[in-house]
Image (cartoon, rainbow, N blue to C red):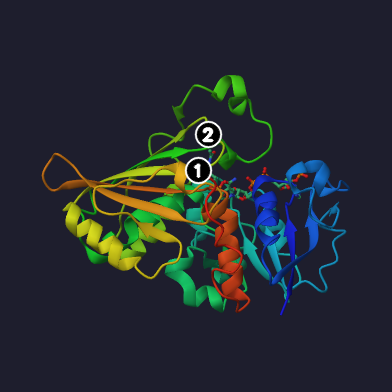
Amino acid sequence: MTHNVAILGASGYTGAELVRLIATHLDLRITGLSGNSKAGMAMADVFPHLRHLDLPRLTTIEDMDLSGVDLVFCALPHATSQAVIKDLPRHLKIVDLSADFRLRDGADYEKWYGKPHAALGLQAEAVYGLTEFYRDEIRGARLVAGTGCNAATGQYALRPLIAAGVIDLDDIIIDLLAAVSGAGRSLKENLLHAELSEGAHAYSAGGTHRHLGEFDQEFSLVAGRPVQVQFTPHLIPANRGILATVYVKGEAEVVHRTLADAYAEEPFLMVLPLGQHPSIKHIRASNFCHIGVVKDRIPGRCQIIATLDNLTKGSSGQAIQNANLMLGLPETAGLMLAPVFP
Ligand SMILES: NC(=O)C1=CN([C@@H]2O[C@H](COP(=O)(O)OP(=O)(O)OC[C@H]3O[C@@H](n4cnc5c(N)ncnc54)[C@H](OP(=O)(O)O)[C@@H]3O)[C@@H](O)[C@H]2O)C=CC1
Ligand SMILES: CC(=O)N[C@@H](CCC(=O)OP(=O)(O)O)C(=O)O
């Protein structure tokens, strides 16, 4: 059975990625696309790489007919998302890609996002969208909160290790490289080519990145006690992709076996042989996450290196994986595209 879907924020990067992926998804049909400044335009004029597709024209959200729609992907900025979602008709299933419904606690949201949440009831109803760890809840959910892309990468590297108690929970460092499309499509000075190319810099240093809210929430839940990690992202002059090197105190062989066992049946999470480590180039434009474990020269320490594409497994691919579960479709439908290489 084909399900009608609409994409709010289709003129942004994650919106365009949703369209690209849904184009080959046999069970989903796009019936509505929204833009804000681009409302009224044809998708092909905003994104010429999608010219071959027969797509609805971009409209405002207000002008969209949602009566025949089963599920909405909401790819809007933080804060805009909660304001829009709280007024959507109740018959709709919603996969939100923003940060608005990831944190369970209103006080945590205010701490990391600097203002009170405008839809606390919905925040309590939302299911955290890290598919592999919330499958059953996602199947029955009306509203799923897509994870941060950095937050997903760090959690894939660490969750099974925290659950199994095979690493020191008070000695975890996540050092992460993030490509520029993670910042969205709007113009920002520090993202200009002349200021970004041939360079690299840390941002939100000193434990201030808002994805720490997700790490704190999820790792503490898994451990059954508060866990705080050190995390610094670095902006790199690449278009898409995230690569995290995670420093832990634990035996490499045990860490590797724990991850390999945890993900043995996962279609999208690939654990490399012990000693090998992954590259952003090997997951590009795909829904796969590659994870490697390498032993450190200091006894009893090792690194976990994980990579995924922020626009696919880190947002739009994850969103479709969750939508598949919510609609009773095979979880991998439309998502088994091989990475683009080189
Ligand atoms: N980029 C990434 O790698 C990831 C992004 N996310 C999250 O997904 C969401 C979308 O991100 P991304 O696609 O990168 O963002 P973009 O900035 O590329 O796109 C934002 C979209 O929202 C629309 N929009 C902006 N303001 C309004 C408004 N006031 N009312 C209605 N529509 C509006 C824009 O329309 P228009 O362009 O027509 O003005 C555009 O379609 C964000 O919440 C982001 O944090 C999550 C994980 C990863
Ligand atoms: C390069 C860059 O700026 N990346 C973004 C990650 C985007 C993401 O995961 O999304 P949310 O904004 O939805 O949390 C960042 O680190 O803030």
Q: Amino acid at mark 1?
A: Gly
Q: Percent from the top left, x then y, of residue 258?
A: 25, 63
* Quarter assignment of residue 246: top left
Q: Where is the N terminus found, in terms of image quarters?
A: bottom right
Mark 2 is surrounded, within 10 Å at the Cα level, by few (under 14), some (14 to 19) or many (20 or more) other residues, namely some
**Where is 232 relative to 219, above or below?**
above
Spatial CA span between label 2 and label 1: 7 Å
Q: Amino acid at mark 2?
A: Ala
> Can residue 100 be seen by looking at this rendering?
no
Q: Which mark is residue 238?
A: 2
Asked if the beta carbon under badge 1 is closer than 8 A to the nearest atom of ligand 1, the reply is no
> Helix, strand, or loop for circle 2?
loop
**Where is 8 relative to 77, above or below?**
below
38 or 18, which is in the foreground?
A: 18
260 or 131, which is in the foreground?
A: 260
315 or 128, which is in the foreground?
A: 315
Q: Which mark is residue 293?
A: none
84 or 306, which is in the foreground?
A: 306
Q: Percent from the top left, x then y, of residue 298?
A: 13, 40
> Can residue 189 be seen by looking at this rendering?
yes
Q: Percent from the top left, x then y, of residue 21?
A: 65, 57
**Where is 103 relative to 114, above or below?**
below
Q: Percent from the top left, x then y, of residue 75?
A: 67, 54
Q: Which mark is residue 241?
A: 1
Give the residue at x 75% y 47%: 11
Q: Are marks 2 and 1 in contact (CB under 8 Å)?
A: yes
Determine whether, in the image, residue 105 is placed left or right of residue 85: left
